[in-house]
């Protein structure tokens, strides 16, 4: 095994040196030491962590085709071999291959990879301190599964479309329902003013599925953006719909304002209405200041309200060194209670960052409710030293 690994590594080094466009390899890593104390349990101590990644690019990103008006085209990109903490990272060296037959008038037939028959235009909102998008149970994301493979016929350009045909199983499968799904995506770009797309989907995999979606982006004037999205599906006679509207305005170097609302209608009933408002100050250099209000799950729970803020100021000490005190403060009306995260981040020597942090109160994941409020939760105090390559 060690011999095989050495051979693979040598091949990667050679391939990287020959085929890499910018560099033969990239190396990154970081290490940190954290001392912390949980003021609830009085437990305290050190935690060490370190990671490193060595990446060898194996090919250029590029494609191969002839100069004929009708020709095959194959594009190969992102083939790399990565070693993370001494082990091969299987998620990062698979690469991607796209193969098409190119036709006149920007038309094409794609044979690889299999086109996706899934869309989600109206994504649920994320709360002020959320790490990722909401996993609302009312979210409508039409998709045909299983999806064994298929092809697409379409056209690129300002006006674009893709007709996608997929099958539920392969001819080599021992069992299967031998069903097919058909999707049609149509879009149009209004230059710098925005774009619109319409999704339709029909399938007969285990249960009848008919779905449609709409996504509209608008930029009518500088600094202003608007989005309207909706998704509908009917599965064996059960109807679901959701929609989202997002508005944003940014006055350069002064302030930003954002508003969004999400509507979930499983069974065509008003089950979930969420609202979000954000205001940010941009006028002061190195100052981060944001405030927001989230209102969740109307009309069922009128007390699902979160008022939150984030403030930080970076005091520069030369070109790279700085000291940045920060504070995140929120009040949730669900429990009710307070959340506080405050501390100071310091970059005083090269490659090294020190962070003193206190967090009191705990949020439910991606929600406006606190599972434990400041006071009932005495909090956690940590001091972190992190060195990054």
Image (cartoon, rainbow, N blue to C red):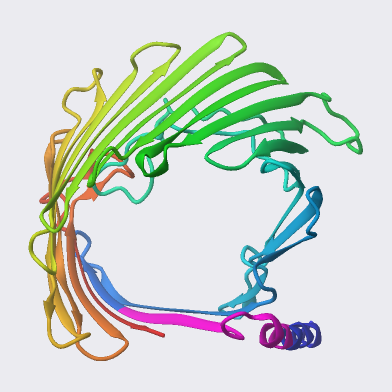
| In the depicted structure, whether residue 316 falls above or below residue 227 | below
Please report the bounds of the magenta region as a residue range: 12-33
Instruction: Tell me where residue 191 sits by quadrant.
Output: top left
Residue 39 visible to the viewer: no
Q: Position of residue 356 (x, y in %)?
A: 18, 74
* Residue 101, image x, y percentages: 78, 47
Residue, x 24% and y 72% (percent of image)? 36
- Who is closer to the viewer here, 161 or 43? 161
Q: Is residue 332 left or right of residue 180?
A: left
Q: Considering the image in quadrants, where does the C terminus appear?
A: bottom left
| Residue 253 to residue 160: above or below | below
In depth, the one of 91 and 15 nearer the eye is 15
Quadrant housing residue 154? top right
Q: Is residue 379 magenta?
A: no
The residue most toward the top is 237
Magenta run includes residue 31: yes
User: In this image, 207 relative to 243: left or right?
Assistant: right
Q: Single out the residue that lies furthest toward the bottom.
A: 349
* Residue 7 showing in the rendered view: yes
Residue 128 lies, with reference to residue 274, above or below; the image says below
Quadrant of the rendering where the N terminus is positioned: bottom right
In-front residue for pair 69/332:
69
User: How many marks overall?
Assistant: 0
The image quadrant of residue 92 is bottom right
Q: Residue at x 35, y 29 (%)?
A: 244
Q: Position of residue 320 (x, y in %)?
A: 22, 85
Q: Which residue appears at 76% of the width and 85% of the height? A: 11
Residue at 44%, 31% in the rendered image: 215
Name the side, left or right, on which 170 lies relative to 56.
right
């Amino acid at each position: 095994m060690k011999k095989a690994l050495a051979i693979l590594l040598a091949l990667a080094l050679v391939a990287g040196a020959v085929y890499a466009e910018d560099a033969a390899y990239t190396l990154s890593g970081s290490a940190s030491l954290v001392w912390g104390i949980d003021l609830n349990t009085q437990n305290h101590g050190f935690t060490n962590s370190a990671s490193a990644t060595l990446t060898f690019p194996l090919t250029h990103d590029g494609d191969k085709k002839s100069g004929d008006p009708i020709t095959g085209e194959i594009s190969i990109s992102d083939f790399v071999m990565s070693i993370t903490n001494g082990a091969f990272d299987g998620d990062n060296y698979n690469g991607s291959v796209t193969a098409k037959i190119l036709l006149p008038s920007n038309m094409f037939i794609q044979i690889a990879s299999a086109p996706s028959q899934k869309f989600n235009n109206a994504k649920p909102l994320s709360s002020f301190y959320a790490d990722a998008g909401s996993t609302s149970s009312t979210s409508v994301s039409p998709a045909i599964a299983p999806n064994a493979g298929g092809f697409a016929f379409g056209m690129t350009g300002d006006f674009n479309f893709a007709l996608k045909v997929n099958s539920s199983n392969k001819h080599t499968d021992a069992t299967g329902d031998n069903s097919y799904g058909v999707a049609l995506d149509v879009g149009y770009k209004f230059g710098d003013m925005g774009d619109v797309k319409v999704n339709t989907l029909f399938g007969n995999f285990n249960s009848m599925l008919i779905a449609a979606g709409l996504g509209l982006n608008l930029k009518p004037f500088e600094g202003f953006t608007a989005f309207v999205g909706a998704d509908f599906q009917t599965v064996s006679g059960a109807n679901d719909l959701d929609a989202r509207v997002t508005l944003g305005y940014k006055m350069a170097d002064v302030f930003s304002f954002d508003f969004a609302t999400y509507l979930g209608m499983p069974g065509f009933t008003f089950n979930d209405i969420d609202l979000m408002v954000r205001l940010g100050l941009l006028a002061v250099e190195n100052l981060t200041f944001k405030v927001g209000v989230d209102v969740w799950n109307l009309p069922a729970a009128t007390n699902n309200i979160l008022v939150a803020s984030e403030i930080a100021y970076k005091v520069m000490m030369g070109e790279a060194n700085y000291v940045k005190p920060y504070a995140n403060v929120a009040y949730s009306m669900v429990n009710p209670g307070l959340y506080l995260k405050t501390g100071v981040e310091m970059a005083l020597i090269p490659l090294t960052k020190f962070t003193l942090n206190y967090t009191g109160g705990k949020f439910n994941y991606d929600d406006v409710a606190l599972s434990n409020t400041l006071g009932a939760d005495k909090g956690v105090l940590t001091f972190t030293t992190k060195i990054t390559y």
